[in-house]
Image (cartoon, helix red, strand yellow):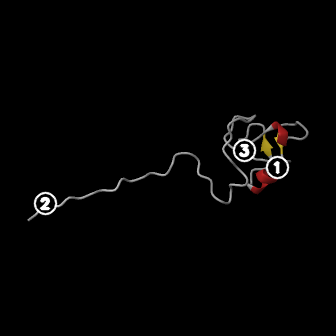
Amino acid sequence: MAASTVTLCPVVSPPTSEVMSPQTTDYTTPATTHDSGGSAYYRNCAAARAAGVAPLHVSDPGYRRKLDRDGDGVACE
């Protein structure tokens, strides 16, 4: 019996960075800087509402002073 050679293909894991679905691409992107220290970014209040996270409080990921028109610590009211 002849010896056979088996060639294995490597298993490739998905990237560990955040993967955006087509539904959320227009609304959220990873932020590099922001006011609250969270990991979300919403371009505007319409995007935050579409993502189902409005209103945003000052301690919430994605809160930015620019989204808080009256400066009361609650954005996209």
How many numbered discs? Answer: 3
Residue 45 lies, in percent from the top left, at 82, 49
User: How far is mark 2 from mark 1, CA to CA?
Assistant: 66 Å
Residue position for label 1: 45
Label 2 or label 3, whichever comes before in sequence order = 2
How far apart in space, not on screen, are marks 3 and 1 (Cα)?
A: 11 Å
Image height check: is 56 above or below 51?
above
> Which residue is depicted at the point 77% across and 51% down?
48
Q: Which residue is mark 2?
A: 3
| Left or right of 20 on screen, residue 14 | left
For the residue labelled by badge 2, is the local secondary structure a helix, a strand or a loop?
A: loop
The residue type indicated by label 2 comes to Ala
In this view, the residue in front, 68 or 26, is 26
| Distance (Cα) linking label 2 and label 3 | 58 Å
According to the picture, the residue beneath numbered tag 3 turns out to be 41
View extreme (right): residue: 70
Residue type for callout 3: Tyr
Residue type for callout 1 = Cys
Percent coordinates x, y for residue 25 in the rendering: 68, 54
Left or right? Give the position of 72 relative to 61. right
Give residue 27's mark.
none
Residue 71 location, quadrant? top right
Q: Residues within 10 Å of mark 1 (few under 14, many from 20)?
A: many
Q: Residue at x 65, y 59 (%)?
A: 22
Depth check, front residue: 77 or 7: 7
Q: Would you call the spot at circle 3 few (<14 residues within 10 Å), some (14-19), or many (20 or more)?
A: many
